[in-house]
Amino acid sequence: MRRAICNVTMSVALCAGFLGVFAAPAAAQDPKVAVTGGVDFSNRYSFRGIRQNGGEVSIWPFVDAGIPLSSGDGALKSVTLNLGTWNAFHTEIDKASFVNRDGEPTGNKWYESDLYATLGLGFGTTTLGFTYTSYMSPANLWHNVQELAVKVSFDDSGALGKGAVKPYYEFGGEDGKFGYFSVAGIATVPINSNWNVHGGVELQLYGDKLRSVNGYGDSGDRRYTGIASIGIGFSY
């Protein structure tokens, strides 16, 4: 997250040409834009196993707009574009403890603001996604990072029903192998057809390299971290 990975320029014209070649048109229907969002509260923000806050609360407001671009009966079943933002506010940030990249004390609690765009190609139960993300720090605690990630996912709910795990493989840029394992669970309680309350827990296990990156030392402790969160979400 601290290093620039790649710069990407996305071309809408190129995407439109791709759709015209591979997507056989289905019956005409009005596309519906799906908007989801919410805010979560967590005791720890860990980015790919690397801790981003030392304590107190990390607050994560987010919003996403899913735009259907094309659907058809050919090999390419659907094409969608998702545009969104994800943010992190850290209550621990204060002028007495934090200094920005300009060497100035800062109490700006807006630690991170991400803008992303994802082009999703649906091939039945398999989905291929290309995501460009710009990671920014409004508090100016680290430099802007740009990333291109490719994600392949498979929906196994047809075979496993409620026991589906929906596995996926994702890679982005030149990230190294940090050596951590994560297992998590989440529960969602609907308030009505559009709003919900949700909460989750996650356990992260660290290898020696990542313990060092996180500043846990070589004493053999802190091989794991428990993360808990609760939030409210909406979808329209």
Image (tube, helix red, strand yellow):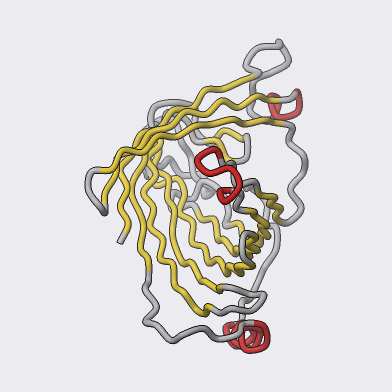
Of residues 27 and 79, the one drawn nearer to the viewer in this rendering: 27
For residue 46, above or below residue 119? above
Residue located at (39% from left, 31% from top)? 92
Examine the image and state in which quarter residue 67 appears. bottom left
Answer left or right for 65 relative to 53. left
Residue located at (62% from left, 48% from top)? 1
Residue 57, position as x, y percentages in the image = 38, 31
Residue 86, position as x, y percentages in the image = 44, 53
For residue 19, above or below residue 104? below
Image quadrant occupied by the C terminus: bottom left
Of residues 65 and 144, the one drawn nearer to the viewer in this rendering: 65
Residue 120, position as x, y percentages in the image = 58, 67
Answer left or right for 130 relative to 218. left
Residue 94 in view of the camera: no
Residue located at (75% from left, 28% from top)? 209
Residue 180, position as x, y percentages in the image = 69, 31
Of residues 173 and 23, the one drawn nearer to the viewer in this rendering: 23
Answer left or right for 71 relative to 10. left
Q: Residue furthest left?
A: 192
For residue 139, above or below residue 198? below
For residue 164, above or below residue 33? above
